[in-house]
């Protein structure tokens, strides 16, 4: 493992950098010789020559410090040495430091050489632990990949990758944890992920099962790469800033209430849309604009007047989904908790209804106070709808927003499914013939 790495380093060596390093070392060697010469002639009383030699040595060293050192520093990757490491003392480390203190006290009081030898070994363990753990954390990067679309309450698999960019040394016993502030308690990565071994120039992957309980936005400010290697005396954490934000869609899994509502909605839609289908809707008197093939001749003979059959248009799949977010929000904490749960059920119900109609390839439009989508096939706008539902929050009823539902009364050409908290008596009568209402208080 070492020989190929050395060979690669030799092939990829920085020739100008090594040349500059060689020149700098030779210059510093000359400056050292001149400094020693200055000290020698100063003992002989030749002060002018000693001063000139010392000044020349100082100028050579200063030239190296001003020109060569910055150029070499730019060619050197120092990012592995500059990262911040947070320390935590676990219970094992506390016990170990207590033992060191006891041995140190005994060695000082007794002057026993064996105790001093044991004390030196214990202190060496601390030093070795610090050096090795920092080496393990050096040159390590990570990548966290999540699915493109995430639904609340549904488990998913994410992929966590650890990259070891060190040339020769592997990294051992690493754990990746999610870190965040107290103001943002929701964590994307809530459990640590363990990586026992990552080879030099290697990549280790772990599949992580996640589940987000509620819809909304989840943020992860940073991740911590943590290790107790090699002795478990100290826990070091390297913070990796990798801000991630994911939008979790509401749960669209059909519930019992969804299964109960869908047949009722379909029946209302079939009653609303009248056209050239195969399901008989009603029989009415003949009008001059009607086609003769829809005349029910038997019934016309019985009644003595032409009667026409009307059919429900089965291929009609156009509807508008409306969520009215303006609600009376209770101030009482207990009532607010029940209100929030009911609001979440309403959002999930709207999401499952939208998902159902996009599966049957319906044309639909979605409307709230903030968003109005165009009329399109469901699969074209479904994720825009779910994204809006993920951010949706109840808003207090105010005089300027009381007209949100009233504006829908004039759109009689399309069937509407409306979720609202408004009392039935306050709804416009024109809406009842073209809408199916789901009342918030019944959820």
Image: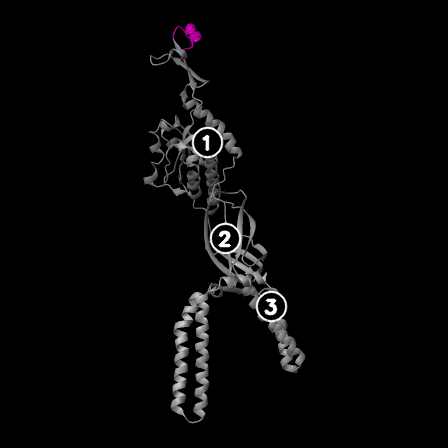
The local crowd at label 2, few if under 14, some if 14 to 19, many if 20 or more residues have their Cα within 10 Å, is few
Q: For the stretch drawn in magenta, what is the main secondary structure?
A: helix
Residue 420 visible to an observer of this rendering: no
Q: Where is residue 6 in the image (x, y as percent from the top left)?
A: 55, 63
Work out which residue is located at the far bottom of the displayed protein and give it. 45
Residue 44 in view in this figure = yes
| In this picture, residue 116 sits left or right of residue 149 | right
For label 3, the residue is 94
User: Residue 263: x, y in percent?
Assistant: 49, 27
Question: Which region is colored magenta?
Answer: 294-305
The residue positioned farthest toward the left in the image shown: 400
Q: In the image, residue 154 lies at what x, y percent?
A: 53, 42
Query: Label 2, on which residue?
Result: 143
Rendered-image quadrant of the N terminus: bottom right
- At label 3, counting other C-alpha atoms closer than 10 Å, the crowd grade (few under 14, some 14-19, many 20 or more) is few
Q: Which of marks 3 and 1 is nearer the N terminus?
A: 3
Above or below, 6 against 250 in this view is: below
* Image point (49%, 60%), residue name: 239
Residue 258 versus residue 18: which sits nearer the camera?
18
Viewer-nearest of discs 1 and 2 = 2
Per the model, the C-alpha gap separating discs 1 and 2 is: 37 Å
Who's the residue at 53% across and 49% down the image?
Answer: 159
From the image, tell me which residue sits under label 1. 357
Q: Classify mark 1: helix, strand or loop.
A: helix
**180, above or below 393, in the image:** below
């Amino acid at each position: 493992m070492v020989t190929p790495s050395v060979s690669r380093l030799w092939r990829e060596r920085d020739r100008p950098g090594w040349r500059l390093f060689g020149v700098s070392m030779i210059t510093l060697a000359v400056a050292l010789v001149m400094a020693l010469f200055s000290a020698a002639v100063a003992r002989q009383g030749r002060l002018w020559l000693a001063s000139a030699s010392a000044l020349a040595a100082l100028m050579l060293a200063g030239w190296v410090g001003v020109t060569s050192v910055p150029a070499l520093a730019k060619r050197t990757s120092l990012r592995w040495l500059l990262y911040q490491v947070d320390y935590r003392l676990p219970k094992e480390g506390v016990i170990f430091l207590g033992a060191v203190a006891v041995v140190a006290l005994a060695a000082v009081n007794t002057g026993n050489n064996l105790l001093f030898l044991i004390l030196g070994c214990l202190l060496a363990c601390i030093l070795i632990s610090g050096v090795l753990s920092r080496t393990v954390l050096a040159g390590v990067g990570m990548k966290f990949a999540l699915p493109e679309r995430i639904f609340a309450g549904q488990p998913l698999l994410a992929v966590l990758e650890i990259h070891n960019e060190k040339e020769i040394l592997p990294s051992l016993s690493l754990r990746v944890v999610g870190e965040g502030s107290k103001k943002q308690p929701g964590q994307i990565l809530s459990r640590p992920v363990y990586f026992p071994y990552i080879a030099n120039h290697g990549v280790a992957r772990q599949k992580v099962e996640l589940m987000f309980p509620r819809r909304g936005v989840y943020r992860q400010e940073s991740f911590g790469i943590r290790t107790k290697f090699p002795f478990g005396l100290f826990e070091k954490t390297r913070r990796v800033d990798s801000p991630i934000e994911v939008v979790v869609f509401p749960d669209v899994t059909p519930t019992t209430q969804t299964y109960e509502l869908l047949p009722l909605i379909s029946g209302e839609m079939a009653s609303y849309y009248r056209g050239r289908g195969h399901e008989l809707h009603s029989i009415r008197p003949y009008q001059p604009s009607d086609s003769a093939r829809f005349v029910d001749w038997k019934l016309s003979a019985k009644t003595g007047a032409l009667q026409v059959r009307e059919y429900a248009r089965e291929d009609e799949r156009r509807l508008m989904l409306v969520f009215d977010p303006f609600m009376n929000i209770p101030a009482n904490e207990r009532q607010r908790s029940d209100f929030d749960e009911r609001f979440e059920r309403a959002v999930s119900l709207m999401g499952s209804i939208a998902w159902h109609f996009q599966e049957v390839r319906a044309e639909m439009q979605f409307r709230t106070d903030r968003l109005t989508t165009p009329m399109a096939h469901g699969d074209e706008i479904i994720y825009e709808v779910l994204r809006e539902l993920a951010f949706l929050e109840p808003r207090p009823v105010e005089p300027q927003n009381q007209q949100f539902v009233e504006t829908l009364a004039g759109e009689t050409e399309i069937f509407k499914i409306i979720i609202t908290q408004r009392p039935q008596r306050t709804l416009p009568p024109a809406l009842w013939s073209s809408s199916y209402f789901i009342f918030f208080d019944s959820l």
